[in-house]
Amino acid sequence: MNVKKIVLAGLFIALEVISTRFLSIQTPVLRIGFTFIPTALSACILGPLFAGITAGLADVIGMMLFPAEGAYFPGFTLSAFLAGAIYGLFFYKKPVRFWRVCLAVLIITIFVNLGLDTLWLWMLTGKGILGLLPARMMKSAIMFPIQVITIQVVWKSLAASLKHRLSFGGTN
């Protein structure tokens, strides 16, 4: 286990918890924020498995430190893990390409955010899926270009610097 990876994972967990709990707008069925940035960056640097674990741990730790209304629900931890892993599959050791960012964000938006997260909310709230979807779809439509542009700009601006400073000398 690489000490640098563990330290970076801890840093990304802290960034995800802070951005989720303090820098997001939260309603019972929507969260609007920039948690995707540390998740995507951890995927670029740590790879799919570590990014997934980091995102999942951030969800669990965030819930333990700052419990929201209701009990902990593991479905959202699975969603966080999958988002980190998907970003990792598209970004880790790959060139910065606009289509790659679009595809990763699209898959996460459709299958994780609109699919699984809506399912988890239905299970928790009992509200009909068709009642939950319109607001969630609108939020996703607004956030999609914001996520794509933000990830593209941040990844591109940090790619050269990260390549030299964070070489791990091994594989994931």
Image (cartoon, helix red, strand yellow):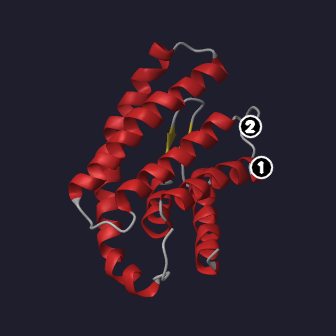
Q: Where does label 2 land, which residue?
A: 72
In the rendered view, does 104 fall on the left or right side of 22?
A: left
Q: Where is residue 140, by image quadrant?
A: top left
| Residue 152 point in image, percent of width and height | 29, 62
The amino acid marked with disc number 2 is Tyr
Extreme bottom residue here? 164
In the rendered view, does 51 fall on the left or right side of 99?
A: right
| Residue 86 point in image, percent of width and height | 43, 49
Q: CA distance from mark 1 to mark 2?
A: 8 Å
Q: Is residue 140 something one can see in this rendering?
A: yes
| Residue 111 point in image, percent of width and height | 42, 33
Viewer-proximal residue among 149 and 55: 55
10 Å crowding of disc 1: few (<14), some (14-19), many (20+): few
10 Å crowding of disc 2: few (<14), some (14-19), many (20+): some
Q: Helix, strand, or loop for circle 2?
A: loop
What residue appears at the point 56 percent right and 57 percent down from the top-left corner? Answer: 19
Q: Where is residue 153, by image quadrant?
A: bottom left
Disc number at residue 64? 1
Q: Are marks 1 and 2 in contact (CB under 8 Å)?
A: yes
The amino acid marked with disc number 1 is Met
The answer to whether residue 114 is above or below residue 86 is above
Extreme front residue here? 171
The answer to whether residue 108 is above or below residue 131 is below
Q: Helix, strand, or loop for circle 1?
A: helix
In the rendered view, does 71 fall on the left or right side of 87?
A: right
Sequence-wise first label, 1 or 2: 1
What residue appears at the point 54 percent right and 49 percent down from the top-left corner? Answer: 24
